[in-house]
Amino acid sequence: MKKLKFIGNPLLQSREKINMSSDKKWLTLKTTEDNEEFVVEESVAIMSNVIKNMVEDGCASSVIPVPRVKGNAMGKIIEFCKKHTEESDEKVLKEFDAEFLNLGPDALYDLMVSANFLEIKVLLDSVTTKVADMIKGKSSEEIRNILKIENDLSAEEIEESRRENCWTRQE
Amino acid sequence: MSATYTYTYSKRSSNKTFSWEVLNLIAMKCDAKTLATASCVSKLWASSMSSDHLWKSVCTTHFPSLSNLHPSISYRRIYALGLASAKRRRQPPPEPRLSIDDLLFAVTIPPGKSRDGSITILKPFSELENHPEGRFRFDVSLNDVVSEKLMVDEEDDGDMKISSSIVMRGYESVFRVLDRKGKTSRREWWFTEELPSAGCCFCNGASGLLAEITLVFGETVVVVTGSGTEKKERKKKVVEKVRIGVMNVVSTWRYATVDDALRYLQHFLLPKPAAV
């Protein structure tokens, strides 16, 4: 086995112990906001359309800079993509997603924004569905509480939207 | 190998800005009711959730015929209209202003070739036998009304003409049901008339209702007339009941409900409501 030399990142160093087969490609994703690096298999990374295009166009060097995505979110995203590339059983994936998305609104928000930016359709679908389910059937006040949104509507605007939407109350 | 990252996040201010893009993605997963409620959350949500393209698919699915009103009005408004209109169509008619207890049934059976004197029955509907499912069909037993059996046969009475009315208690008003010759058959003789339109919606045209008076037979007796060589034996049917019914004849022939019949009759029996 080739002994690979890694400098700097402790995460990378631990890979020396792993038996790496030579036909698996690895990429390094670096979040430029907080300079965290993540080593992932190419097959996992290309769940992101953005990264996939970069790789196919040949402009992906060994380290791919990823703006706008925080390290925390990146970690979560990789965890998600990994599971979805490894597992093909629909039922298992569904259970995983349900558990995975058991997050607070801030985390969900970050995931959504990041998944949107990285164009990871499966993740985006799951998160948006989860949020849509969270607000379904709730009153506007409850939605604000759940997602921690400030009400910036003026009194007239509130009155007007009440009138426009009064049919929601008459079922 | 998988390293699970626990998500830790610093305290954020509650002024998180959902970008329009993100909101749009969530909105596309929401049903109409959720979209409408979500429009009341904040300014950004209001503009995002009211976006016409979101409401377009909802509208064209639920109310395709109304969707042509766009772009004179927004799809969101069309949806609200469609919902209100569907609700109105489902609304049942108001309670009748007439009660069955206010009405009396009158029917006259004329004299026949072998029968003198007509028979007139006048009885409150409340004393008549009602249809088991509460439809407008009432029977009066002749035993309760006349002392002698009423007997008919085709030869003597085949061209009989029956008259019937519905009378308002206190003789305040009367609705003529029919004056007619009828059809005969072995088991029953029935007399029918199409009822006129109530005049509240149409100038001409049928009401879709049919009034029906039926003579229901019981036993058959043999009557002997004459003597000696002129002796004649005739089979006569005894009328057991007289029945009045109002039928709905538009798509299926069924007795109308009592309420429907009352709503019809009130046009003729109650004074017209004063013009506002």
Image: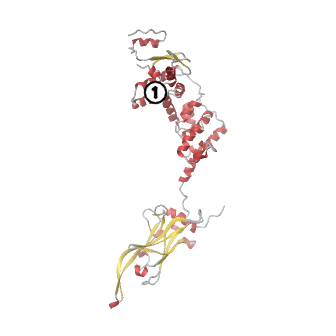
Res B261 visible: yes
Look at the image and name its color scheme.
secondary structure
Quarter of the image where one finds residue B200: bottom right
Q: Amino acid at mark 1?
A: Phe
Instruction: Where is residue B20? Give x, y as percent.
Output: 59, 31
Residue tagged 1: A100
Instruction: Where is residue B120? Give x, y as percent.
Output: 48, 78
Instruction: Where is residue B234? Give x, y as percent.
Output: 36, 82
Q: Is residue A19 above or below residue B133?
A: above
Q: Residue at x 46, y 27 (%)?
A: A100
Asked whether B140 or B153 is in front, the reply is: B153
The C terminus of chain B is located in which quarter?
Answer: bottom right
The N terminus of chain B is located in which quarter?
Answer: top left
Local crowd size for mark 1, using a 10 Å CA cut-off: few (<14), some (14–19), many (≥20) = some
Q: Residue at x 40, y 24 (%)?
A: A86
Res B152 visible: no
